[in-house]
Every structure is written in C-alpha cells, then in structure tokens.
Image (spheres, rainbow, N blue to C red):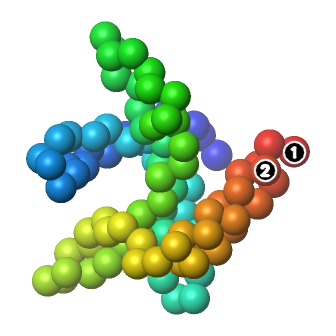
Amino acid sequence: MEDFGPTFITITDEDDNEIVLEFVDALEHNGQVYQAFFPAAVEGEEENEDDMGLIILKVVHVDGEDMLSTLDSEEEMDAVYDLFMELLLEDEE
C-alpha cells in the first residue's frame, strides 16, 4: 500500500471558526461510521496543549450527502473513543 501522506479536512465550528483536522482513522460501531482526527498544527500559531486530543465525529447522511456531526452522548463518546484507542495502539505494534 502506498502512503500519500496525511489527509486534512477543514470544518467550521458553531462560532464560524475554521478548524483544520488531520484524518486518523475510521471505524463502524453499532451501524454508525465514526472518523477520528487530530487538530492540525497551524503554522505561526502556538500549539495549545488542550487542543491536542483525539476528535471523533460521526458520519451522517443529510439530503443525500455525507456530513460530519458531533456525537450525541458522553456514553457514545466513551465507547467509540475506547475503540479508536484500541485500533491506534494495535497499529503501533
């Protein structure tokens, strides 16, 4: 498999701030597709240690298009976060 380097996406938060995310991985859990991202380091901006955690969004279909959405509950977030951590730790071995 060829490695073409990281994949980046730009999303807009509820305050209309653009956030650049680096795609990490995707998985399916209970019939729902989730994608994990790390915040991309922006040149000229100091890295905020608080922002360096894994960001998990789910893929939802709206009007025939795939959109990314935040998760609905803390329980959903915890379950999917644990699955991504297992996946990422497996990749490092």
Under circle 1, the secondary element is: loop
The residue labelled by disc 2 is 89
Q: Residue furthest top?
A: 44
Quadrant of the rendered image containing residue 57: bottom left
Contact check, label 1 and label 2, Cβ < 8 Å: yes
Q: Tell me: residue 92, above or below residue 29.
A: above
Kindly identify which numbered label has been placed on residue 80: none
Asked whether 37 or 76 is in front, the reply is 76
Q: Is 52 left, or right, of 67 in this rendering? A: right
Residue found 76% across the figure and 60% down from its top: 86
Q: Tell me: residue 69, above or below residue 24.
A: below
Q: Tell me: residue 56, above or below residue 42.
A: below
State the separation of the CA atoms marked 1 and 2: 7 Å
Q: Residue furthest right?
A: 93
Asked whether 88 or 65 is in front, the reply is 88
Q: Residue 13's spot in the image, x, y percent?
A: 22, 51
The residue labelled by disc 1 is 93
Residue found 54% across the figure and 43% down from its top: 53
The amino acid type, in three-letter code, at marker 2 is: Leu
The amino acid type, in three-letter code, at marker 1 is: Glu
Inspect this view and state whether residue 80 appears. Answer: yes
Mark 1 or 2: in front is 2
